[in-house]
């Protein structure tokens, strides 16, 4: 996509050249934009209340505007793109993207999105306004002329004038549906560099993968002198169900009936395993493979375990066995390539025809450089194995401790074992190699993920800490 992409990664296709700008001509009656000082004063208290704000638990000590660009101005709407740096007490600063709309007044649908009122102007989160979404979509269709660049994939043939709406609950990003045909995703927390989500979708597009949505364009800007991805547009996968929801429905059916046959998920799991293997094969074919010493991988896992000890009560009791498991995985070289990097049931969609993998940006807490570093496909496999376990155990963890819970837990555990076996069988059939052939490394990756989960639960949801802790015990006991 850019000169900042590593030399081992094929360059992205040049974006199509726009024939005209989508930015309307300014009009004298447009609402006045707020000053930077007004914006930063309002953003300080507003940001921590947003679901996508990734620094919850830290006090905001200041906000600086790093970049500001007016994307559109009409008689009743001004659209301003902001990149802000948020300073945090006890932590490093973070960068966020906040497109805002400015109107003289807003209707009640936008009241909850308002962050600032000045004399004659209301400033609000622009991604809650279909008109602002329309401006961004039109700029992708026709191109932008400023510092924020809107680039379409050649042949994307994006139309203008499509309506937009926010898709469900926000997580670390905000996704909007445009014209019920496209998904536009804005990365709220901005990491300097090329986002793997765009990079890997480009590669899988070249491979003509059947298990991803087609990339149509992306948004970028130069941030601290590096080309940085701000958002992307791809086809909207209509008629799809999230993998997590689909799995939970199966577990619920099993527990309600007391019968594994009532929620058999093995067929879906086998198909999902094949889809993951197919995507891994396509990424390897387009972007290449490499070999890394297993000791590097196991050293990184060991470091994460050690850092979790002060946070996760009881982890130290299993430490000798944890270290033995990790050490057993470090005896051979590891085949590495570009992978998804944060794969779980929430990152896959089930359509009537196939499974589709989404959100290839990798683990958001890691740097862009770390997320773009080749890793073993077994990390993705382990992530899905842990997600299957979570889907089942989340349905029994809150039940009262009695014989009924014990029976439900045994049934859920059997559902997990059957589902995981089917997933691994499907992966092996498509890949031509079985993940269980390198069982020591697979278990180390599962342990790595379980420790990550334990840290999260210890900090945010202690009632669920038993889920990853029981998984750690099963892993280290063989």
Image (tube, rainbow, N blue to C red):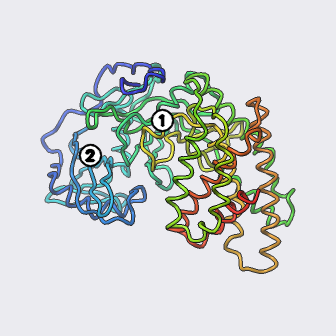
Within 10 Å of the Cα at label 2, are there few (<14), some (14-19), or many (20+) other Cα atoms? Answer: some
- Dot 1: element: loop
Q: Disc number at residue 279?
A: none
Left-right relation of 221 to 200: left
Report, in whole angstroms, how far the alpha carbon at label 2 lies from the one at label 1: 26 Å
Please state, as top left, top right, bottom left or bottom right, where the C terminus lies in the image: bottom right
Foreground label between 2 and 1: 1
Q: Is residue 16 in sight in this rendering? A: yes
| Residue in front for this viewpoint, 306 or 35 | 306
Residue 246: x percent and y percent? 69, 52
Quickly name the residue at label 1.
372
Q: Position of residue 103 (x, y in %)?
A: 23, 51
In terms of sequence position, does the residue under pointer 2 or pointer 1 come before the other?
2
Q: Which mark is residue 82?
A: 2
Closest to the observer, 188 or 421: 421
Circles 2 and 1: CB atoms closer than 8 Å: no
Name the quadrant of the N terminus. Answer: top left
């Amino acid at each position: 996509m850019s000169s900042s992409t590593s030399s081992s990664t094929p360059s992205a296709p040049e974006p199509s050249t726009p024939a005209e700008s989508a930015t309307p001509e300014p009009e004298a009656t447009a609402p006045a934009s707020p000053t930077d000082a007004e914006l930063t004063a309002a953003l300080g208290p507003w940001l921590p209340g947003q679901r996508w704000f990734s620094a919850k638990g830290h006090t905001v000590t200041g906000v600086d505007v790093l970049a500001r660009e007016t994307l559109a101005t009409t008689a009743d709407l001004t659209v301003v793109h902001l990149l802000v740096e948020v300073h945090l007490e006890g932590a490093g600063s973070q960068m966020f993207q906040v497109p805002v709309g400015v109107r003289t007044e807003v209707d009640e649908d936008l009241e909850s999105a308002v962050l600032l009122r000045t004399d004659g102007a209301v400033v609000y989160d622009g991604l809650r306004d279909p008109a602002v979404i329309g401006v961004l979509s039109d700029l992708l269709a026709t191109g932008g002329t400023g510092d924020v660049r809107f680039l379409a994939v050649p042949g994307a043939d994006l139309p203008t004038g499509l309506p937009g709406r926010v898709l469900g609950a926000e997580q670390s990003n905000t996704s909007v549906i445009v014209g019920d045909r496209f998904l536009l995703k804005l990365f709220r927390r901005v990491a300097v560099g090329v986002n793997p989500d765009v990079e890997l979708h480009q590669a899988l597009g070249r491979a003509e993968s059947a298990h991803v949505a087609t990339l149509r364009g992306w948004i970028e800007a130069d941030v601290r002198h590096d080309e940085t991805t701000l958002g992307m547009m791809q086809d909207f996968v209509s008629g799809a169900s999230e993998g997590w929801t689909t799995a939970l429905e199966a577990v619920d059916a099993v527990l309600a009936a007391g019968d594994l046959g009532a929620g058999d998920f093995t067929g879906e799991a086998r198909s999902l395993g094949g889809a993951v293997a197919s995507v891994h094969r396509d990424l390897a074919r387009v972007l290449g493979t490499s070999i890394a010493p297993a000791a590097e991988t196991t050293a990184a896992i060991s470091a994460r375990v050690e850092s979790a000890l002060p946070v996760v009560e009881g982890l130290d009791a299993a430490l000798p066995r944890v270290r033995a498991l990790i050490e057993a995985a470090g005896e051979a070289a590891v085949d590495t390539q570009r992978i998804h990097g944060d794969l779980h049931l929430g990152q896959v969609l089930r359509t009537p025809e196939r499974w589709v993998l989404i959100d290839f940006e990798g683990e958001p807490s890691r740097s862009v450089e770390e997320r773009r570093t080749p890793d073993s496909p077994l990390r993705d496999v382990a992530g899905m194995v842990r997600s299957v376990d979570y889907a089942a155990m989340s349905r029994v963890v809150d039940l009262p401790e009695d014989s009924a819970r014990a029976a439900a837990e045994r049934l859920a555990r059997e559902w997990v074992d059957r589902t995981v076996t089917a997933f691994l069988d499907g992966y092996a059939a498509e890949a031509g190699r079985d993940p269980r052939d390198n069982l020591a490394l697979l278990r180390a990756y599962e342990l790595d993920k379980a420790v990550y989960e334990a840290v999260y639960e210890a900090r945010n949801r202690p009632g669920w800490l038993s889920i990853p802790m029981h998984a750690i015990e099963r892993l280290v006991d063989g």
